[in-house]
Image (tube, rainbow, N blue to C red):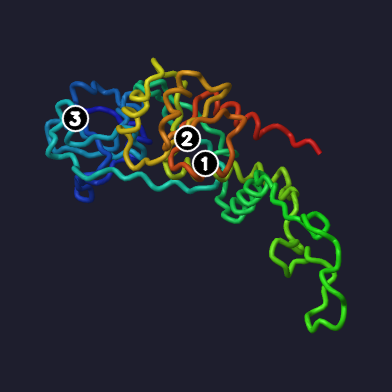
Amino acid sequence: MAFSISRGIARSFGSLSALRFRASPIVTAHSFQASELSGRINGDNLPHAECFSFSTGGPAFLGFQRFSTTILTPDSNGGDFPSDLLSSKTVLTPERTIGIYEDLVVPVSNFHNEDHGFMVLAGDVFDVPIRKDIIHRVVRWQLAKRQQGTHSTKTISEVSGTGRKPWRQKGTGRARHGTLRGPQFRGGATMHGPKPRSHAFKLNKKVRRFGLKIALSARAAEGKLLVFEDLEVPTHKTKNIVNYVNQMENAKKFLLVDGGPINEKLKLATQNLHYVNVLPSIGLNVYSILQHDTLVMSRDAVNRIVERMHTPINR
């Protein structure tokens, strides 16, 4: 039976001798009879596949399309297509390049492992270049700022003791001294000792903000950033958190970050676990992220962090 083929379709066909069917990790096939085509083949009627064939009672012709959106493996439900012709090779996706400010799509779950869709993470917050020097500067700034600085020693005017000269200046054969409160005597003063002061030093807001972005990006690149719909727990029992933690693999310490004030049930459920800590989004910092290998954030916390990172810096 004769039928017509559009010029674009005809160009996609190769000669029968040049074409060989090759198993590919991404391939589907369909067979058409000439009676089914009935003289009408166009781009809209062709399936979205990489390989298809049709016959007119004679030799089969193979056509290849440039794109495919279907992935079939021997374990997939491929219909009538023989599974022995499908490749058993694992389809590998190329590794993502880190630090190109690309938006990330992550699944959203909860403590009950329920599916709550997906969430898009802003690339300028969760996919920035990793800078260890910035992380080092921010951590030093945090540790210095939180240092109490209450250390104190007594000078010669503050120690207890008399002010009289212990013995006369000359004639005793001993070293000359004018007081027993000097630093060379037991119970005497401490010279150039520490006094109460602040150890904090200035660090630009841009650097501090960039450090937090780097820490979040590092956890996202490692696959250690989990997004939950919320951090609600049914009861205040610790076993609820313990059961969830036991299901996680390759995770030792968890940092739970909620958007607003911490729920009282969650606070009671985690206060006896040294490997689970809870923070509001306003208290999220670089040092706490580095101390925990797994970061769990609620959807509200992610939105608040992104909003905070996008807020202009007041000068």
| CA distance for labels 2 and 1 | 7 Å
Asked if residue 39 is positioned above or below residue 182 in the image, the reply reads above
Callout in the foreground (2, 3): 2
Q: From the image, tell me which residue sits under label 1.
A: 289
| CA distance for labels 1 and 3 | 56 Å
Quadrant where the N terminus lies?
top left
| CA distance for labels 2 and 3 | 55 Å
User: Which residue: 17% across, 32% down?
Assistant: 55
Q: Earlier in the sequence, mark 2 or mark 1?
A: 2
Q: Percent from the top left, x then y, of residue 229?
A: 46, 21
* Front position in the image: 181 or 43: 181
How crowded pointer 2 is (Cα within 10 Å; few <14, some 14-19, many 20+) is rated as many
Q: Percent from the top left, x then y, of residue 211?
A: 61, 46
Callout 1: SS: helix
Q: Is residue 93 left or right of residue 127?
A: left
Q: Is residue 143 left or right of residue 23?
A: right
Callout in the foreground (1, 3): 1
How crowded pointer 1 is (Cα within 10 Å; few <14, some 14-19, many 20+) is rated as some
Q: Percent from the top left, x then y, of residue 79?
A: 17, 26
Mark 2 in CB contact with mark 1 (< 8 angstroms): yes
Q: Which mark is residue 31?
A: 3
The amino acid pointed to by label 1 is Ile
* Front position in the image: 130 or 203: 203
Callout 3: SS: strand
Q: Is residue 197 left or right of residue 295?
A: right
Q: Which mark is residue 232?
A: none
The amino acid pointed to by label 2 is Leu
* Front position in the image: 208 or 102: 208
Q: Percent from the top left, x then y, of residue 200?
A: 72, 48
